[in-house]
Amino acid sequence: MRVVAAMSGGVDSAVAAARMLDAGHEVVGVHLALSQSAATLRESARGCCTIEDAGDARRVADVLGIPFYVWDMAARFKRDVVDDFRAEYAAGRTPNPCLRCNEKIKFAALLDKALALGFDAVATGHYAQVVEAEDAHGGVRRELHRAVDMAKDQSYVLGVLDADQLAHSFFPLGDTTKPRIREEAAERGFFIARKPDSHDICFIADGDTRGWLTRELGEAPGDIVDTSGEVVGRHAGAFAYTVGQRRGLALSRPAADGEPRYVVEVRPETNQVVVGAADLLGVNAITGDHARWCGPAPEGVVHVGAQVRAHGEEYAATAWADGDRVEVRLEGRVRGVAPGQSVVLYEGTRVVGSATISASRLERAPVGSPGDDLSPATGST
């Protein structure tokens, strides 16, 4: 099989490429140039897309003896990931850029180009597993499952992949823990065996998301209000706040009961940030749009696990699809669910699909059923 190995310059993608070569595939290494002005040196463990990273990837390819190319996808990355990130925050939502990058860049642009050039699949260093299972017609389908190393599991950010993309994807690291991957890299003689992982948002190398948004969107002073509408503080831009946030509010007066207050809603139309007590953050009903399924869409009500953050807890839930929308009812309350985040649904370790959260709410009545009103909820409380 002819395989493109996406090589970031890090240890995970290096070992993934090596394992594909060991498995007998014809492997070509590809580094994605995603920055329009790549730095010459990495200044911390946070960033990526530096000239140093491209060089590291090339040297690993040389050790493996495989062809190596750099594909320039900076313009598409800016449009589909960076600009989307900026626009989502400006609209009062909280996006996940890693999930968007997987959807639009690594498993759309990269995979599409690889297939067009005659390759059969793409392999990456993500921590997840593809498992072959028999489908209803006696054929074989490829399922996406959690990684063995739950501390590194990245199935959440791969939840946007559909069945066609999974059919052409390999994740060779999913059955191994991260410490073992570093040991293997050292055994193979890779000089990057101890290279630090990149963290947070790759295009915000200093990790200061609020500062980046302020530079991109400009300051837009407005009011921080409590749930009664009383002004309790000021902000420099509502876009810098997300539901569930407690730190950095700088409120002018404490709550009457002395308890801490959290962001419970962001209102971009009035440039207001609403704060309230912690119990206002608990929700048990989620509406998601733009649903994507890793196989056939579920029929009727299904029992699933629901995860709303990349490294968050999984919650027992029921869900049902309604076109490109999904309704999720949690068996307990979850705090800090923000519009723009993704909800990923699981059946055991298998990823069922995902959707972008458009609304969340607390339903006092028993959890939902297909007969419930499926009209989109407003707000996020």
Image (cartoon, grey):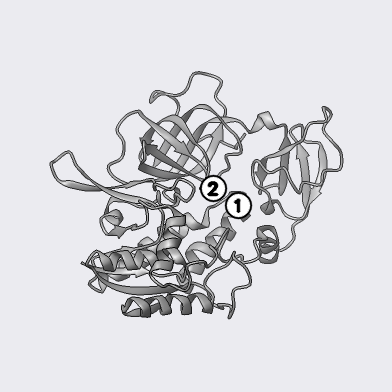
Q: CA distance from mark 1 to mark 2?
A: 9 Å
Q: Residue at x 45, y 36 (%)?
A: 306
Q: Residue at x 39, y 45 (%)?
A: 146
* Quadrant hosting residue 165: bottom left
Amino acid type, label 2: Gly
Q: Residue 68: where, in percent of width, then height?
A: 35, 79
Q: Is residue 24 above or below residue 96?
A: below
Asked whether residue 293 is in view, the answer is no
Q: Residue 316: where, in percent of width, then height?
A: 45, 30
* Left or right: residue 298 compared with residue 200: left
Q: Residue at x 47, y 80 (%)?
A: 55
Asked whether residue 113 is in view, the answer is yes
* Quadrant hosting residue 275: top right
In front of the other: 28 or 71: 28
Q: Residues within 10 Å of mark 2 (few under 14, many from 20)?
A: many
Q: Residue 319: where, in percent of width, then height?
A: 40, 32
Q: Residue at x 61, y 39 (%)?
A: 336
Q: How many marks?
A: 2
Circle number at residue 340: 2
Q: Residue 34: where, in percent of width, then height?
A: 48, 72
Badge 2 marks a residue whose secondary structure is loop
Amino acid type, label 1: Ala
Badge 1 marks a residue whose secondary structure is loop
In front of the other: 200 or 72: 200
Tell which circle, 1 or 2, labels the residue nearer the N-terminal end.
Answer: 1
Q: Which residue is mark 1?
A: 91
Query: Given contact means CB atoms under 8 Å apart, are the residues at marks 1 and 2 in contact?
Result: yes
Circle number at residue 361: none
